[in-house]
Image (spheres, coloured by chain):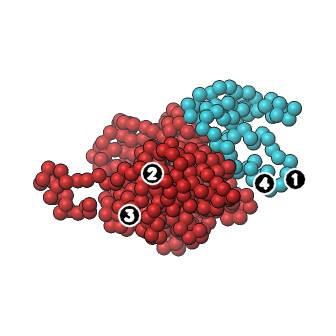
Chain colours: A cyan, B red
Amino acid sequence: MGDAVLLDRPDPEAGEAAWDGYLHLRDNPAGVTRDLWHHEAGCGAWLVVTRNTVTHAVEGAELAEAAAREGQA
Amino acid sequence: MRFSALKILREGLSGNRGWTPHWRDPAPKAEYDAVIIGGGGHGLSTAYYLAKNHGMTNIAVLEKGYLGGGNVGRNTTIVRANYFLPGNSEFYSHSLKLWEGLEEDLNYNVMHSQRGLINLFHSDGQRDAFARRGNAMINQGDDAVLLDREGVRRMLPYLDFEQGRFPIHGGLYHPRGGTARHDAVAWGYARGADSRGVDLIQNCEVTGIDIEGGRVTGVQTSRGPIRAKKVGIVVAGRSGQVAAMAGMRLPIESHVLQAFVTEGLKPVIDHVVSFGMGHFYISQSDKGGLVFGGDLDFYASYAQRGNLPMVEHVMEAGMTLMPMIGKAKVLRSWGGIMDMTPDGSPIIDRTGVEGLYLDAGWCYGGFKAVPASGWCMAHLMATDRPHEAAAGFRLDRFRDGYGLMDEEGTGAQHNLH
Ligand SMILES: Cc1cc2nc3c(=O)[nH]c(=O)nc-3n(C[C@H](O)[C@H](O)[C@H](O)COP(=O)(O)OP(=O)(O)OC[C@H]3O[C@@H](n4cnc5c(N)ncnc54)[C@H](O)[C@@H]3O)c2cc1C
């Protein structure tokens, strides 16, 4: 479901530039990226998958909830 | 060298020894008035119209691989002007008109074939939406005909009209829609630009963009630095990376779109048929191969190949719609890198850097845009003002929300297009 920057939501008062960056702008890397996946047909969990956009190799996955909590700590 | 029937006849009778290369292979000069990064369809057409419409001939196209090796040679070649919203509809209408005069203009056979495009619908609600779209197309000056089920059956008798999931209620017929030969479009523009003095420089990867005091001064490349007063970024799926060289982050995510072709068959499919509900569309090439595809794989990718779930999905949709193709053998499948924007519409605009321009965000529909995109990008680069047909393709429309284009009615969010 897109770049895992989505877990890093700015403060509501952070201003237009921060929200534009969060909603629309992307690093769009050729190489290792972290994106959000929804296990739609299974357990319904949200995952952060570390993945290579050039080779399609999957390097790791963790629950989005855990990733988000780490991000805040 | 001009192509003509007489020339072909003469060459045919004299062993085809008189054909010459279609363009030169020059070494890069130290400085140009303008350089265009990317030798795909859009980069080449931009160069052509800069030279032809604006008299700018001291310019170069820098291509990291070979001309036409990107998406312009990987797409399924559909050319149409059946857009609904202002902003898009006048632009694609302009593009289709350019297509209709392209072969004469370029003196090049791009095999533009207006065989007609039919978008199928499967419910009353969809019929209403298509009737409205058809009216928008007619108001724009283009053509559209609403077909009922019998009308579709007369044109496409081989469809399975009674399938349970998506019974066919009718279709929107766009007679001027069709296909073209994709590489010929790149070659034709390349030859046209070259013959007007444009340097087409292949195997030349841009690795940096030089900026001094907010103004672009040139580029760094794998073949050395090149100074330029103006620089256009026209690199489709690689837009994010090249823009990053100028310190920009773009509203673009690169995704993979797959396509398929079968062995050559006798003519069976006379039109372009689009089955939106199933995510499937098909046409038959002049060589006889059935060329078809579906939707994005829906994850960010630079791999130029997709995965099997989408392959299966596309094959299933094809079999649902037209079981007769079941025996055709798929020869090849491939993928291309799509520069997806949040609202599914492109960008042709200035950037925050003076003299640096961006043409990007073509998503999965940029082949038909090649003529008008080049036309409008050339206008922008030459005059520093947007062309009226592309004035809506602003880079900042996402930030302020003003002028967003929501062609598919899905909102302006990544991963919905
Ligand atoms: C499977 C598939 C089906 C499609 N079907 C259709 C269709 O039916 N109809 C339609 O209208 N559109 C279709 N499209 C979309 C269309 O092909 C693209 O939108 C369009 O070709 C993109 O523009 P382009 O031709 O300029 O891109 P490209 O041909 O990709 O050109 C970009 C060029 O930039 C070069 N480049 C990148 N980085 C650098 C650098 N750093 N330095 C120098 N050069 C660089 C690349 O090598 C490349 O040659 C399809 C695409 C795919 C993949």
Which label belongs to residue B196? Answer: 3
Identify which residue is drawn at 53% across, 36% down. Answer: B303
Query: Residue B3: where, in percent of width, then height?
Result: 25, 61
Q: Are marks 2 and 1 on the same chain?
A: no
Identify which residue is drawn at 39% across, 41% down. Answer: B261
Q: Which residue is mark 1?
A: A13
Quarter of the rendering containing residue B408? bottom right
Please tell me which of labels 2 and 3 falls first in the chain. Answer: 2
In screen coordinates, is B12 left or right of B207?
left
Instruction: Measure the C-alpha gap from mark 4 to mark 3.
Output: 43 Å
Disc 3 residue type?
Answer: Arg
Q: Which residue is mark 2?
A: B28
Query: Residue B249: where, in percent of width, then height?
Result: 68, 49
Q: Specify whether residue B165 is in view.
A: no
Looking at the rendered structure, the secondary structure element under dot 1 is loop
Which mark is nearer the camera, 3 or 1?
3
Within 10 Å of disc 3 (Cα), the crowding (few <14, some 14-19, many 20+) is: some
Instruction: Measure the C-alpha gap from mark 2 to mark 1.
Output: 50 Å
Which mark is nearer the camera, 2 or 3?
2
Query: Residue A25: where, in percent of width, then height?
Result: 70, 49
Q: Which residue is mark 4?
A: A17
Disc 2 residue type?
Answer: Pro
| Tag 2 and tag 1, C-beta contact below 8 Å | no
Chain that bears disc 1: A
Instruction: Measure the C-alpha gap from mark 4 to mark 1.
Output: 11 Å
Q: Are marks 3 and 1 on the same chain?
A: no
